[in-house]
Amino acid sequence: MTSLNRFDPRVIAPHQVDAHLQAVPLDRLTASGLRRHFASPPIWQPDVVRERPLPNRQSSPAAVLVPLVVRQGHLSLLLTQRGQHLANHSGQIAFPGGRVDESDTDLVHTALREAQEEVGLSPQFVEVLGTLPIYVTGSAFIITPVVALVQPGFELQPNPAEVADVFEVPMPYLMNPAHHRHHRAMFEGAARQWLSMPWTGPDNRERYIWGATAGMLRNLYRFLVS
């Protein structure tokens, strides 16, 4: 296995790709299909709930918005690329979100506030469907993913202090496990494992979705395929 001290996850080849698993049915990847699924949730188990902790990290509650944009009956996921200068998860593909603030009334409020602060997404376009199980990152963020539909008509204003880029990925691609890749490597003497879901958009630029973002998307896949 490769050391992560000089780590580029894109160079670690997957040891497993889940092409043998069923994709989420397309009728569930619609606004009405998602509403029905969240209104009558199945019995299911998430695949990933906790990453191996990194040393000397203090836990911090957080929430992210999983914004599913309704595009002519189809759904796409709005994601950000974090700025390279940020202290945590710099340069990585992420959901809009962040730490709970003392002024937040609940975790949904946290996710909506952070999305507005990071990318300028107004809550008036957002319909919250529900939440996924808590996901604990190796950096000790205790994250609640808030899944929501986003109606078109919004205008984004990414905050350059936090966000380097904003883009959308088709949900049928992300909810097809043929694009879910499993990796492992050594870091500080311990074996670590993660998922990736690389996606190349119409601009021929690869967006390397991995780590916590891919883990939470995998849990969304498990929920929707159940």
Image (tube, grey):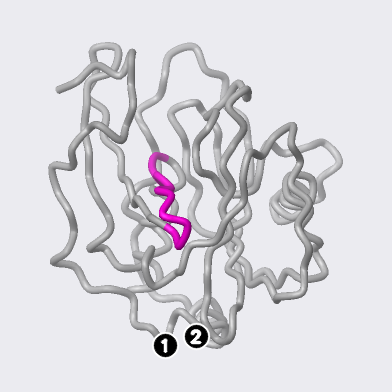
Give the residue displayed 26% in from the left and 35% down from the top. Answer: 193
Please name the amino acid that badge 1 sits on.
Asp
Please name the amino acid that badge 2 sits on.
Gly
Estimate the x, y position of residue 138 in percent, counting from the top left. Answer: 43, 28
On the rendered structure, is 135 left or right of 14? right
Q: CA distance from mark 2 to mark 1?
A: 6 Å
Give the residue displayed 35% in from the left and 50% down from the top. Answer: 198
The quadrant the C terminus occupies is bottom left
On the rendered structure, is 27 left or right of 114? left
Residue nearest the viewer, comparing 118 with 111:
118
User: Which residue is denoted by mark 2 in the rendering?
Assistant: 33
Estimate the x, y position of residue 217 in percent, counting from the top left. Answer: 42, 56
Give the residue displayed 61% in from the left and 62% down from the top. Answer: 67
Estimate the x, y position of residue 29 in percent, counting from the top left. Answer: 45, 79
User: Which residue is denoted by mark 1 in the rendering?
Assistant: 27
Q: Main secondary structure of the magenta part?
A: loop
Instruction: Specify the segment rendered in magenta.
Output: 201-211
On whether residue 137 falls in the magenta region, the answer is no
Q: Are marks 2 and 1 in contact (CB under 8 Å)?
A: yes
The quadrant the N terminus occupies is top left
> Residue 94: in sight, yes or no?
yes
Q: Which mark is residue 58?
A: none
Q: Give above or below for 135 relative to 69.
A: above
Residue nearest the viewer, comparing 41 with 63:
63
Estimate the x, y position of residue 97 in percent, counting from the top left. Answer: 65, 45
